[in-house]
Amino acid sequence: MKWNYSILIAAMSLGIAACGESNKSVNASSDVSTDNSIQQETTMSYKRMQQLDVPAPVAKQVPHTFEHHGISVDDPFNWLRDSSYPNTDDKEVLDYLNAENDYFQQFLAPNKELVDELFEEFKGRVDETASSVPYVDNGYEYWWEYKEGHDYRTRYRKNLETGKVEVYLDEQALSEAHDYFVIGGVSISPDNKRIAYTIDTSGDERYDVFVRDLSNDQEIEVAIGDTNGSVQFVGDSNTLVYGKLAEGVWRTESVNTQTIGVANSDRVLFAEKDTGFFLGSGLTTSEEYLIVSTGNSDAREVVVFDAKDLSKPGVTLFSREDKLQPSVDHGNGKFYVRVNDKHVNFRLASMPEANLSNPQWQSIIEGDKTLYVQGFKVFAEQMVVSLSREGLEAMHVIPNEGEAYDIEFPEKVYSVGLSVNPSFEQQHVRLRYTSMITPSTIYDYDFKTKSLTQRKQQKIPSGYDKSQYETVRLMAPARDGEKVPVSIVYKKGFKKDGSQPLSLYAYGAYGAGMSPSFSTTRLSLLDRGFAFAIAHTRGGDEMGYSWYLDGKMDERENAFNDFVDVAKHLVKEGYTSKGNISIAGGSAGGEMMGAVTIQAPEMWRSVSLMVPFVDVLNTMLDATLPLTPPEWNEWGNPIESKHYFELIKSYSPYDNIEKREYPPMLVTGGLNDPRVTYWEPAKWTAKMRALKTDDNLLIMRMNMGAGHFANSGRYGRLMDRAEEMAFQILAHREK
């Protein structure tokens, strides 16, 4: 029920990147392949999916030119950005988006059987009555369940003293009046009598706060709206802390407190005036301190407040002037920090809380070229550290007394992370484990017996036989000599003779590494003869923090080049052939899809650009967009710098569309998306239609009632995925 502070900070650091699947690769036989032998490239000819018989929408072109640094740029589709945004009500804009949706429906109509077939396959792998592993917190046992046919969870708790079980949050009931519904933060008061939670009903990620008295199920009026979704009881059962969004823009401008039932008690605890900074807050593991963190990918400021008395001034542990990326926690009378002051791959350090006014950090784990400190969790008698060694994940235990050690897992290549661990005093750590062929598994690791106990594994009602699938990890040579990790999974019997199709995915931005995780929907591709691969390109952090730095700013094009080079390597290794690869990515991964479509259109059988960040130059030139100033540290500031104007213009996908042939494309967007605004996919689609010289299919699905994450609810999202996968499969049916 508490905010996991390390997760909160990681999410904040992603900026507009918080999207897309988180997938990585693992090896069935637990071997990591570094075989550089190159097979003869297989050359085949493939027919591409053709446009529909009905006319495609044609967006009008309105002359529009802008100039920076003496360079003029024409943008005849600029009109697709509604001048009254974020209120999108321009009739011509809406008419065009609706026309594209109608055209998309024309594509779906004759392919409904396949879409429905995929949807039923996906549903068949969903445990209709899935439930969580219970955890104990403050005298109660908590868990959630799905009821059959429900899109949303019902949350329960049991009083460990009385044995009474009650529903403390019925998400399904709350969702009934809304087409779109997402629960944000949830917090139970320290006296266990109240619950605070946040709800978004439009997809614009502006959440309202609700508080209920759990003893009588009556709502308590708090009148808190336009929040970032975070809410937390702090200090007592009457004080709430939440993130307040700026009026009209999606940016957290302050961390506020409010005393429930006290008029005019709302006050600003910490305000952030720099529009280039992301702001958030969370309790430490000990619950003794509230940590406020604000910053971007270059610098972060950390201020700690006494959680029992927020009227006291905060103490700054790290200043933004330090130009560091600290993540701080507290327990056992000490502050702990993950920080990059001594090494690019971070170190782990601590100091006694008595030194709060004069921090002197002592290293626990030093930074290292081959060891990347990713996160940590403090417990009463030990701490657990998430590590990556040369791209392979590990969980490292450091007891207060005794030698440190790694937790052993059943596979050598896997993805593992902290699950729900609410109690500082607990004698186990709960972990979430998966691999490309292992369904999501919850383990409890007992610190005293040093043993793993499987508490739950993802149930697949329609059946799944792990032994029928294989997964490998390759290192693909990039054009500049780097070795790029590639994760691949396929069904046994897959022929590595270049004859079979391959689906290639990447994200490659914001230091958000893709983990080698399991996907039930992906099985529908594998069972149809596809291999699925993830290119762990630079821009992510799979190979350490420098891997991220080598794919941003001036080095951004490394990420795109890595993706194309991975594809070429997979062709040479016989996993597929040139022109028989379907590619997909979302948000910043959608930017990559646009860039590699421009760079190597002949390689792809189809391209899926999901909420794609493709109009990079225009977005980075628009300081009125709330996410633009923070993003200058990722891409460069083209307003102030001619160098970055020219650099971004040279790779911005939208700006580099030219008259030539392109592969079939599926483009998606959300009208209420605050991260990648709707006009980016719309402008890409309009300009591509105007300039491409082929008859290949181009379709766009614009969700008119949602945002960055499309439909809400588990079944709505499955239907979205069924449509997207149907596009990929149909692209490979053309002979």
Image (cartoon, helix red, strand yellow):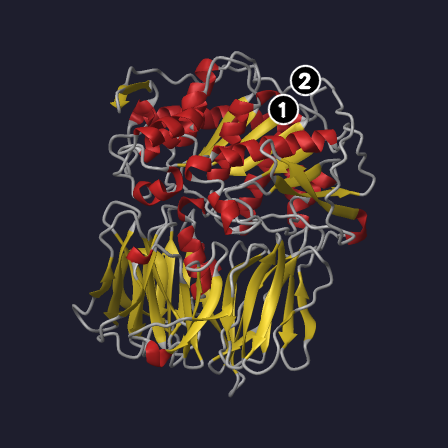
Q: Where residue 258 sits: x, y (%)?
A: 24, 69
Which of labels 1 and 2 is toward the front? 1
Q: Is residue 649 above or below residue 559?
A: above
Mark carried by residue 603: 1
**129 displayed left or right of 43:** left
Report the residue at 80% width, 37% height from top: 494
Residue 47, numbered circle: 2
Amino acid type of the residue tagged 1 in the rendering: Met
Q: Please name whichever residue, 617 or 468, is drawn nearer the observer in this view of the structure.
A: 617
Does label 1 or label 2 sit earlier along the sequence?
A: 2
Q: Residues within 10 Å of mark 1 (few under 14, many from 20)?
A: many
Across and down, in percent, residue 435 comes to: 67, 54
Q: Tell me where residue 403 sits by quadrant.
A: bottom right
- Quarter-of-image position of residue 492: top right
Q: Residue 613 appears at what percent x and percent y?
A: 43, 35
Number of other residues with Cα within 10 Å of mark 2, as a class: few under 14, some 14 to 19, many 20 or more: some
Residue at the (50%, 63%) spot, across then down: 375
For badge 2, the amino acid type reads: Lys
Quarter the C terminus occupies: top right
**Residue 381's quadrant in the figure?**
bottom right
